[in-house]
Image (tube, coloured by chain):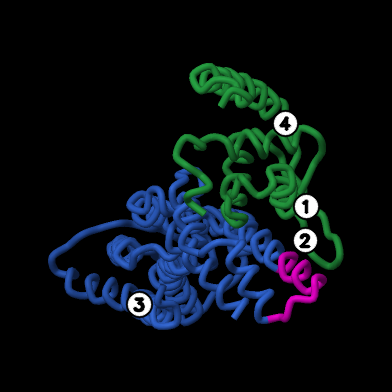
Amino acid sequence: MAAKNPAFMAGVPELVVLGLLADREMYGYEIARAIKVATHDALNLGEGVLYPALHMMESRGLVRARSSRAEGRVRIYYSLTARGKKRLSRLTLDWRRMSLSVDSILGSPSHG
Amino acid sequence: MVEQRFGELREGLLRAGVATRKIRRAVVEIEGHFQQLLDDEAARGTPYHLARSEAHRLLGSNQTLLERYAAQPEFRAWSRRWPAIWFTLVALAAYVALSVSSLAILHIVVEHMHDYLRHVYIAPKVTYRIDLAARIVFLWLFPWLVAFGFAVLAYHRRVALHWPVVGIVVVSILASLINVTVTLTGGPTPGEYGAGIGFSTQSLPGQMTRAAIIASLVSVPLWLAMRRLERNYRL
């Protein structure tokens, strides 16, 4: 599991979760499944640790939570706040800048 | 097995100082996640025991979750952030507030009964019993209630035993130094009441005995409850 998430991935889980929530509100399990499907299991967050991350984002005002009952279970749905949207824009910009820098060193994948 | 894992997670989070509101949310969500993982595996036809171990693997260990929650100071309960303030100053303030507000209520009641009391005769035996009841309430019941309330809080928040014990002792000592007198009489001078705080070497043994009794009445059950908890959850 650790090999899939090297140290330079710090901050990526937050970006990914905020990115998913930009489209629609989701609950924890949905977020975990969406990450799995979208990344073809390349980004292994560890499904349990998604919750402290979500709670942290909530306490920092990046996401808001609402409780709902479905199929006899309590589900907490998360959606982006205005602050969360700003944070997502900044993190996306940082990520693109970093990605371009690394690409420029490594060269185009087609030349690799 | 499932209940045990989430019970241990809850206990671990409490010991890590995470606020109970956050713990309730975390356990509900993580347990719900686990159940959905189980349902998914069951839908694929995976036998239950394999489905369960896969769900545990995907969820990750309790230890990892505990570390993530413990690393965030925002998640900590107030009583765990500042236990010294909470279990000494706040406990003392609670006792003083309870005593002062009760004396204020007593004052209002006597003021309302003033005209009535001027026309009635209250037997000395009744006056004595009212005074005795007031002493029991102010000098025994109130400090015990406050100390007990903070002991329950300490137990629920899994605060290290020495903090509530210090608080209980401090409240008990303050209560032992206080004197309350309520003299409810009828006739031309109805109702006298007063409270005072004093320290005298003559009455010191009695006051300290009172403090020791109140402190023991709360500290010993708290110590026993925490010991039992320690035996039940060895994390």
The residue under label 4 is which amino acid type? Thr
Q: Which mark is residue A81?
A: 4
- In the rendered image, residue B142, in percent from the top left (x then y), is placed at 45, 67
User: Do pointers 2 and 1 mark residues of a single chain?
Assistant: yes
Quarter of the figure with the C terminus of chain A: top right
Give me the C-alpha separation between circle 1 and circle 3: 38 Å
Q: Residue at x 32, y 61 (%)?
A: B163
In contact (CB < 8 Å): disc 2 and disc 1: yes
Q: Is residue A97 left or right of residue A105?
A: right
Residue B113, quarter of picture: bottom right
Which amino acid type corresponds to the residue marked 2 in the rendered image?
Answer: Val
Residue B192: where, in percent of width, then height? 45, 60
**Residue beneath disc 3:** B223
The colour of chain A is green
Q: Residue at x 66, y 66 (%)?
A: B31
Colour displayed for chain B in the image of the structure: blue
